[in-house]
Each structure stands twice: as structure tokens, then as C-alpha cells.
């Protein structure tokens, strides 16, 4: 884990580093997510890609990745607003993160050509994922 991300997680300011806020409220006009729909999206290897990098209490454990932290119990470690920021744009916390920016990819980011410049998930889909991950308490 790099120092700015660690600092952001524990709420420290690093001199000379513009630190993003560590949380993001639910956008206006977006309704609270449904955990069952979020579970389906997280497990979708083609659309969300989450399980290519993350393991967790999801179907097909043998197909889950180990490039990223296990998401078991994430709802006990992070608030909904903290989870929302990470799924929306992890690069605000860690510019070097491997994790795709789901809501708004910008020019120059390492995303596949098919996704360049357009969202991978719409805000309401992110909200379903937030509801699901927030429900993972152990
Ligand atoms: C290409 C790999 C990759 C993909 C795909 C990916 N992530 Fe991540 N994710 C990471 C990495 C690496 C981290 C660790 C933080 C960092 O990069 O600095 C992370 C961190 C997180 C965190 C914070 C975990 C913690 O313990 O603090 C959450 C929540 C998360 N990812 C959710 C998701 C969700 C939901 C998806 C799918 C919509 C997803 N990720 C897709 C690589 C990925």
C-alpha cells in the first residue's frame, strides 16, 4: 500500500500532497441500492470485473483474483460513503491504483479501448454494489 493511500485511510494530511476526501455521498437523484442486484453485478466477470482482482464471499471462489484486498467484511471496515468513493474512483485515493475508475474514466487512464472515456458502471449500478458491499459485515 502506498503512503498517500494509507494516509488518506487513516485521515492524515501529507505535506505537499493534495488529498482527496475519503468519502462520497450518494449522488442526487440516485435511489438507495439493492444488495441482491449489487451481488449479481460484483459476481459478473464481464461487466464489473471485480472478481478478476478481488476475492470475497462470492460464487466460484476458485476463479477469484488475488491482486486486491479480500472484500469479506468490507461493510464492517468502511462506511457506505467510503465504499462509494472507492468504487467510483479509487484513483482519487491512489493515483497508481490498478483498480479501474468505474464512474468516469478520463483520458490517460489505463482502461481498455472499449471503455476509454466512458463509464464502466452507471451511478445506479454503483449504488447497488455499495448496498451489497455495505451488507458484508463479517
Ligand atoms: C484490476 C483490478 C481491480 C478491479 C477489476 C477492481 N478492483 Fe477494487 N481494488 C483493487 C486494488 C489493487 C485495491 C487496493 C487499493 C489500491 O489500489 O490502492 C482495490 C480496493 C478496493 C476497495 C477498498 C478495499 C479496502 O479493503 O479498503 C473496494 C471496496 C473495492 N476495491 C471494490 C471493488 C469493486 C466493487 C470492484 C468492481 C466494481 C472492484 N473493486 C474492481 C483492484 C481492483
Image (spheres, rainbow, N blue to C red):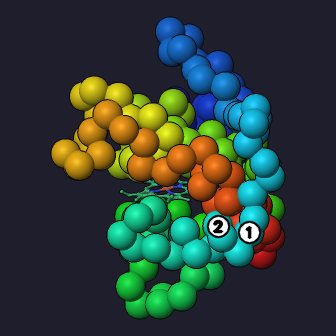
Residue projecting furthest to the top = 16
> Horizontal and vertical percent for residue 43?
51, 76
**Is the residue under label 1 in contact with that under label 2 (CB below 8 Å)?**
yes
Which residue appears at 28% of the width and 27% of the height? 107
Where is residue 18, by image quadrant? top right
Q: Which residue is mark 2?
A: 38
Which residue appears at 50% of the width and 9% of the height? 16
> Horizontal and vertical percent for residue 67?
38, 64
Considering only vertical position in the picture, is 92 above or below 81? above
Considering only vertical position in the picture, is 41 above or below 117? below
SS of the residue under disc 1:
helix
| Residue 74 in sight here | no
Q: CA distance from mark 2 to mark 1?
A: 5 Å
* Residue 131 as seen in the image, left or right of residue 109: right
In which quadrant is the C terminus drawn? bottom right
In the image shown, does 2 or 54 lie closer to the viewer? Answer: 54
Whether the residue carrying mark 1 lies under 8 Å from ligand 1 is answered with no
Q: How many marks?
A: 2
Which residue appears at 62% of the width and 81% of the height? 57
> Horizontal and vertical percent for residue 50?
46, 65
Q: Which residue is mark 1?
A: 35
Residue projecting furthest to the front = 29
Considering only vertical position in the picture, is 22 above or below 113? above
* Residue 82 as seen in the image, left or right of residue 118: right
* Residue 81 as seen in the image, left or right of residue 111: right
> Horizontal and vertical percent for residue 88?
55, 42
- Which class describes the residues within 10 Å of circle 2: few (<14), some (14-19), or many (20+)? many
Amino acid at each position: 500500500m502506498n503512503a498517500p493511500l494509507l494516509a488518506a485511510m487513516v485521515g492524515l494530511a501529507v505535506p505537499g500532497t493534495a488529498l482527496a476526501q475519503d468519502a462520497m455521498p450518494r449522488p442526487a437523484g440516485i435511489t438507495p441500492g439493492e444488495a441482491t442486484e449489487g451481488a449479481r453485478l460484483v459476481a459478473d466477470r464481464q461487466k464489473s470485473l471485480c472478481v478478476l482482482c478481488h476475492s470475497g464471499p462470492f460464487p466460484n471462489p476458485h476463479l477469484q483474483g488475488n491482486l486486491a484486498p479480500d472484500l469479506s467484511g468490507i461493510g464492517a471496515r468502511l462506511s457506505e460513503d467510503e465504499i462509494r468513493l472507492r468504487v467510483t474512483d479509487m484513483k482519487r485515493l491512489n493515483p497508481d491504483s490498478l483498480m479501474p475508475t468505474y464512474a468516469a474514466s478520463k483520458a490517460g487512464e489505463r482502461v481498455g479501448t472499449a471503455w476509454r472515456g466512458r463509464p464502466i458502471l452507471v451511478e445506479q449500478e454503483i449504488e447497488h454494489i455499495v448496498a451489497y458491499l455495505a451488507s458484508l459485515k463479517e
